[in-house]
Image (spheres, rainbow, N blue to C red):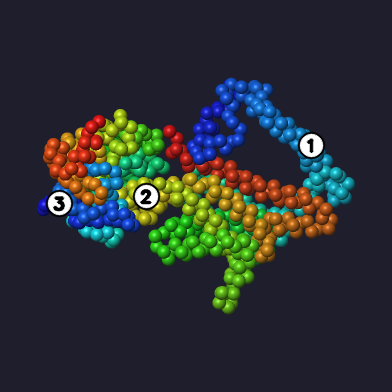
Amino acid sequence: MSKDNPSQPSAAWAASYEEEPSQAGVPPSPGGMTALKPFGWAKDNLFNSRLNTVLTLICLAILWFAVPPVVSWVLLDATWTGSSEACREAVGACWSVIVVKHRLIFFGTYPFDEQWRPFLACGLFVAMLGVSGVRAFWRPWLVGAWALVLVGMGVLMWGGVLGLTHVPNDKWGGLPITLMLSVFAIALAFPLSILLALGRQSSLPAIRSICVGFIELMRGVPLVSVLFMASVMFPLFLPEGVTIDKLLRALAGLTLFTAAYLAEAVRGGLQAIPRGQYEAADALGLGYWQKTWLIVLPQALRIVIPPIVNQFISCFKDTSLVTIVGLYDLLTAATVATTDPEWRPFFAEVYVFAGLVFWIFCFSMSRYSQWLERMANRYNRR
Amino acid sequence: MSNAIIELRKVGKWYNSYHALRDVSLTIGKGEKVVVCGPSGSGKSTMIRCINRLEAHQTGHIIVNGTELTDDVKSVEKVRKQVGMVFQNFNLFPHLTVLQNLTLAPIWVRGMAKSEIEEIAMMYLRRVRIPDQAHKFPGQLSGGQQQRVAIARALCMRPEIMLFDEPTSALDPEMVKEVLDVMIELANEGMTMVCVTHEMGFARSVADSIVFMAEGSIIESGSPAEFFENPKSERTRQFLGQILEH
């Protein structure tokens, strides 16, 4: 018996990727019997033609030359706990820089003795995100739980009550900034993008032009300039004496930018809904919002889960651009960590580490979206 | 006719420069079964889609159960609540189960309680003979079953009038009968029905009158006996010759 039943994943695959069934690249092994034997499998899949044999050999050669040096740099020759002198003598990676600097990378300029607070806030936040992803927890109490967690995070981060010292948010930095900016930007941009996409299809010319204008403006401008405008120009339009927090301005910029891109992804889904669905809803007497909410969006959003999550991931990584308006996200904090003269030679390790943290979050989103897609497309099964 | 439930008076419609309906006038009485037939492009689908304003007419008047259809959203809403429609391609909502397809509109449009309408929906599913499919998704059903679900879905809104737009045209031949049987039952219960179809057997046995359309106009209308035995116009004879040959 083969460990994994081949019919099951392929059925799910066909359900969620109907339009590109051959995406896997490797053709399914004929018969399936040979898959039990590694040699038979290799013969069928890696050496089944002259071209494939050559390609396989080239790949093996690349692996042969690339893997050993990487493994020895990352693991075998690496320094894990030594001083910077020990690192300078070693040939491998210097992971001690992470051990020494991780607090700075994760929490930036937040007061050192109070860093348990952002740690706890991030923990709560990530745990809550995890809980929100589970279908069994999609109940009304989840909204209340979120309200509580957000208040709790606010208390932890700002302090000033319950005997916690006040930490103004220009002292915040690192992971909390990256997480909060991206999650709030996504959470705000998503509903906004749905309205924009619907507005773009509206029969009312005024609404349509506003939405098209906004989307095209935002898509036509680099995020860096949007952030600059939000940070520098926006305050000019405010009445004197009124200031809006820098973090909030960056969040607004990021939200609007992401919403424009998301709107186009959502529009793709809207256009995929057959006209008959609208007509059936009309004929049953459903109003515009009922039709949109009950019939159109549930189908349209399922279709565009991949591009939407793509945009979420992109937004998560884009938060590192807020450094240009003077905010310390995770990557900026990592850069600051490399400016210490003692550890300066080991900037590569710091960036590898920061990259790893980003990757963990992005990869989780990607895996989650695959599960979501399978679950959402259940109704396609026959 | 005093008990007219649908009245079309000199209705005209254009798609840009294409003249889809030309002065169509038709009166349908309560409980009457009307079969509309004609060659493709004759405007028969357009006409019945005007009756619940899936298409808007441009000239003339359409009055459904005392409400004139206008640009006023209220009048459209009022008419749609009283008119059920069955489409050629079923148009079931694929993301909802069969039962949810049936209960959605009564809950949201009529404000009915879920438990109440679910009971009614099951009753209709029994009548169209598929109560055991209630918790499946439409994609898991055959075409004939889907179309019967679509009929039950329309009936759950308790309509006064049922419109059928080529309900059997997208079905495999062996499934046509199960759908027609349900429609015949419905007709026997006294429902007002307007049906665009090429099923001449159904027309002959069920219809009170048959309307023949070509090029956007009603060429002739009359009882099935008149229509089949003694068609008045050459165009009708030609059409009947073509579809009855086989």
* Residue B54 visible at all: yes
Marks 3 & 1 on one chain: no
Q: Can residue A156 be spotted in the picture?
A: no
Question: In the rendered view, does A339 fall on the left or right side of B119?
Answer: right
> Callout 3, which amino acid?
Ala
Q: Chain of mark 3?
A: B
Residue A65: numbered disc: 1
Q: Residue at x 28, y 61 (%)?
A: B72
Quarter-of-image position of residue B181: top left
Q: Are marks 2 and 3 on the same chain?
A: no
Q: Quadrant of residue A219?
A: bottom right
Q: Residue furthest bottom?
A: A240
Dot 2 corresponds to which residue? A278
**Residue B118: image x %, image y %?**
31, 41
Q: Tell me which amino acid carries mark 2.
A: Tyr
The picture places residue A63, in percent across and down from the top left corner, at 75, 36
Residue with the mark numbered 3: B4
Q: Secondary structure at mark 3?
A: strand
Q: Position of residue A164 (x, y in %)?
A: 64, 61
Camera-side residue: B99 or A241? B99
Q: Residues within 10 Å of mark 1 (few under 14, many from 20)?
A: few
The residue furthest left is: B2
Q: Residues within 10 Å of mark 3 (few under 14, many from 20)?
A: some
Badge 1 amino acid: Phe
- Figure quadrant of the C terminus of chain B: top left
Mark 1 secondary-structure assignment = helix
**Image: B44 above or below A319:** above
Is residue B43 left or right of A354 when viewed as pictured? left
**Left-right relation of B91 to A156:** left
Residue A109, x across and y down, in percent: 71, 61
Is A147 situated left or right of B82 in this image? right
- CA–CA distance in space, label 1 to label 2: 58 Å
